[in-house]
Image (cartoon, grey):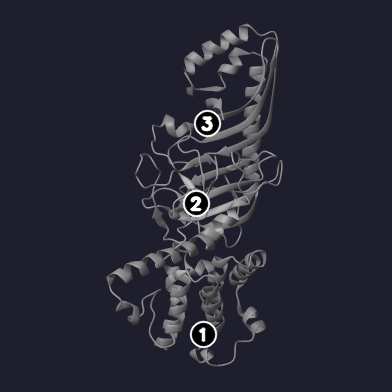
Amino acid sequence: MARRFTVVSLILILLGFTVVKVGALWSSRQTVPDLRAITSPAIDEAGWLASLDTRQRALLKQLNLRLERNDSDYEASLLKALLLFQTGRLNAAVTELRQLTAQVPKFRLAHLVLGDLLLARFDQVESIGSSSLLEKLGSDKEDRIEQLRREARARLKGYLSLVGEVEVPKTLLTLSNATKYALVIDKSKNRLYVYRNLGPGLPPELVDNFYIVLGKKTGDKFREGDLRTPSGVYFVTSYLPDEKLPPLYGNGAFPVNYPNELDRRLRKTGNGIWLHGTDKALYSRPPLDSEGCVVLTNDEFNRISQYVEIGRTPVIISEEVEWCSSREWLALNIELQATLERWRQSWESADIDSYRTMYARSFWAKGYDYQSWQKYKKRVFAGKTYQKIDLSDVSLLRYPQEADKQPIVVANFKQHYRSNNYNGDMRKRLYMIKEQGRWKVLYEGRQ
């Protein structure tokens, strides 16, 4: 009985390291696999499927769908093997892992889990890489195995958070018609989510997600060299192919615009925050192993490239993603779009009193603060006999919420301006802050 418990405990102990309780993922009444099944004929698949509970079936369906869409989704293969093992299909799990390690020889975590499942037939395995055989390899090897354990926990924690109903990320309010995809990063789960724009009035749709590696130290970035990944709303600015980069960056890199306007206002320093691949000598890295960049495997970097448009794709990095219902998402959209329209109307009508109320007292722009901006605009309005202002290509992105901080939204749009003495179009960015229940402009400038 002790040996029987040891075999099934591998996946339970692995899941136990996550903040998600096993009981919330699978029924607490687990069927303990009989070791005789190792040498006996495979469990009837129909009977096995019938034995799965609702969450197990949902997870299996999601993993199979990922593999149907992309048979090179190696993380899905690893997670499927763990599910097979946890539900009593040891032989099927071993087969899945053997195929995976043959396809991706550098996937060290897959090799370690396969070795654990094979050793479980002959030796007690209490957690990933805890076999007595591996303990004899020395402290250096133990450190490397611990890094793989951390990777396993991060992958499971991130992916299993998607089991069940997934709500809308509060950060993605409005994506312009020309913005096809947005990237949302949850640092607490080492996960990058790809959302597709479905059009006006419709919440974005989750279409892909990836395990990612982040800075060696947790928390928001404030100083150059602090080894942290920043939190905020950013945009991909360029693409760097692998032939122009050292091997560390793998198949390429997408730099983002850190530090952005708000970062510089807060006197944050540093630069060179990229989404990039992994050193080609490796398949993947531990969850906290970069100097602040967001790192994917090279296969997944290639996959994500199809979603990225230079100068347009937003990358929203949160300490932990806030979720909301579709109804709440729609209400936030209506509120913010109404605010943007009031700002446009007060400007177009040259109503200086109404226009002034649209700005926060802490407002800044290049060369201006609140007082100097209002004086400048009053002079400009005095010279206008008419103004016609239209906004198009509008995106509204909510800044990741910080404790005890006022909510902030980033508005990007194309501004079409016509008047009696000046005509011009430009791409503009506003930061809007919520003060005493009203949204006001905190920053205004070119993109």
| Viewer-side label of 3, 2 | 2
Residue under numbered circle 3? 434
Which element is circle 2 on? strand
Disc 3 from disc 1: Cα separation = 56 Å
Q: Is residue 432 left or right of residue 50?
A: left
Counting from the top left corner in percent of width and height, residue 357 is at 56, 19
Position of 425 relative to 199 (above/below):
above
Q: In which quarter of the image is the N terminus?
A: bottom left
Circle 3: element type: strand
- Towards the viewer: 373 or 18: 373
| Residue assigned mark 2 | 276
Amino acid type, label 3: Lys
Q: Looking at the image, is mark 3 or mark 1 earlier in the sequence? A: 1
**Amino acid at dot 1:** Pro
* Disc marking residue 33: 1
- Judging depth in this view, the residue of 195 and 407 nearest the camera is 195
The answer to whether the residues at label 3 and label 1 have Cβ atoms under 8 Å apart is: no
Q: Which of marks 1 and 2 is in front?
A: 2
